[in-house]
Image: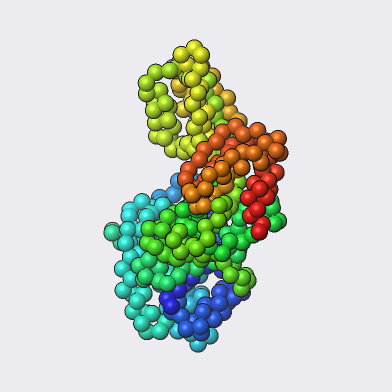
Amino acid sequence: MLIVQKYGGTSVGDLERIQNVANRVAKTVKEGNDVVVVVSAMSGETNKLVSYAEHYSDNPQREEVDMLLSSGERVTAALLSIALNEMGLPAESMSGRRAGIVTDTVHTKARIEHIDPTPMRRAIGEGKVVVVAGFQGVNEQGRVTTLGRGGSDLSAVAIAGALEADLCEIYTDVDGIYTTDPRIEPKAKKLEKISYDEMLELASLGAKVLQNRSVELAKKLNVNLVTRSSFSDAEGTLITKEENIMEKPLVSGVALDRNQARISLGGVVDRPGIASDIFGKLASNNVNIDMIIQTLGHDDSTNLDFTVPMNELGDAKKVVETFIEEGEIKEASYDEKICKVSIVGVGMKSHTGVAAKAFKSMAQENINIMMISTSEIKVSMVIDEKYAELAVRALHSVYELEK
């Protein structure tokens, strides 16, 4: 088998942990596999490099920031390669450029355009472990670029796709995907398998194990993804095509997102295009809208409620104020003490009454639901933040996810 393994910052946090990774890689090779390893910078390294740049400038040139930040992963890749060679395991480290990763020209948030896997294939053919510096590539002008948050996961998935690897393992400090956050509900169970779509929903709803971009790419390239811990030998969770999962559970997981704020607009002028104007202006100010509820008032006006990420509330307020000044909105109120709790599961597609069960469990706990949104495989509810953990435990229990 050809396996791509990715190790995050905590997994390569110091020299001892890099040796631990080398031992794990050696074990995988001894089991008869070809291995490509993708590494992050040692934990804390990227922040340190950013602080160095900010010592000279509040707004350093992005091209130079990329050149600087890409060095963190290269250090880890070289150190791991040295450790493997010392163990008698031939290894070769590669920068993103050397590994053939070509990106667009957007510095600090580049997207991978294509990968020429020839150098990696050559090294694998020579019986070497290939160690690639994650989070980086090179654009058509030959300048170093970085891929933004979760970039090393992205590198690993893209490399697995380009090499047609059998498996891509993402090693972190958690040992898989759970039915909910075990810190909130100790009865949470680790999932053996989950579909790409369920994982995308859980990731976008606040589950922090994997970034959306890497799951989207895995789905597009049909890469079997496993997330597991670098600190234990526990089996991880396989993220794969829906058809590879025999028994599709009704609900796979419960997600909680505390990073939400609710905006209520009263007395919105009832004219064609007003919603388009408001949400268009919010979009042009990079405010992401999640749930929307519109109700008609009695006086030819409309009420609009919607949610935004907490860190974008300030920008949203500025936009709303302009409409109030123009007389298009009578009043606005803002609620930061809310959260969004959601259930996710591909089994919902073929079963009725799943949402009703969720609403009934909230009613039994005397939790008021302010807003609801649904899709084919999820039901999300906005509730008062003080009931967040109670709601998670109630939903986890009512769908018997601990079994």
The quadrant in which the C terminus is found is bottom right
Q: Position of residue 132 (x, y in %)?
A: 43, 70
Can residue 260 be seen from the camera position used here? yes
Residue 147: name its quadrant.
bottom left
Residue 36 visible to an observer of this rendering = no
Q: Residue furthest left?
A: 140
Viewport quadrant of the N terminus: bottom left
- Residue 263 in picture, x, y percent from top left: 54, 29
Residue 110 quadrant: bottom left
Residue farthest to the top, as pictured = 299
Q: Identify the residue shown where x is 50% and y is 36%.
A: 291
Q: Is residue 338 above or below residue 158?
A: above
- The answer to which of 143 and 97 lies nearer the viewer is 97
The scheme the figure's colours follow is rainbow
Q: Front-most of 87 and 329?
A: 329
Residues 356 and 331: in front is 356
Residue 368, above or below 258: above
Of 208 and 123, the residue lying toward us: 208
From the viewer's perspective, is 272 left or right of 202? left
Q: Is residue 105 left or right of residue 283?
A: left
Percent position (x, y) of residue 390?
70, 44
How many numbered badges does the structure rendering display? 0
From this view, report whether residue 86 is shown above or below residue 359.
below
Residue located 55% across and 52% down the image: 250
At a point 34% along the width and 76% down the height, the residue shown is: 121
Identify the residue at horizontal 50%, vertical 55% (top origin).
199
- Image location of residue 78, percent across then percent down: 47, 74
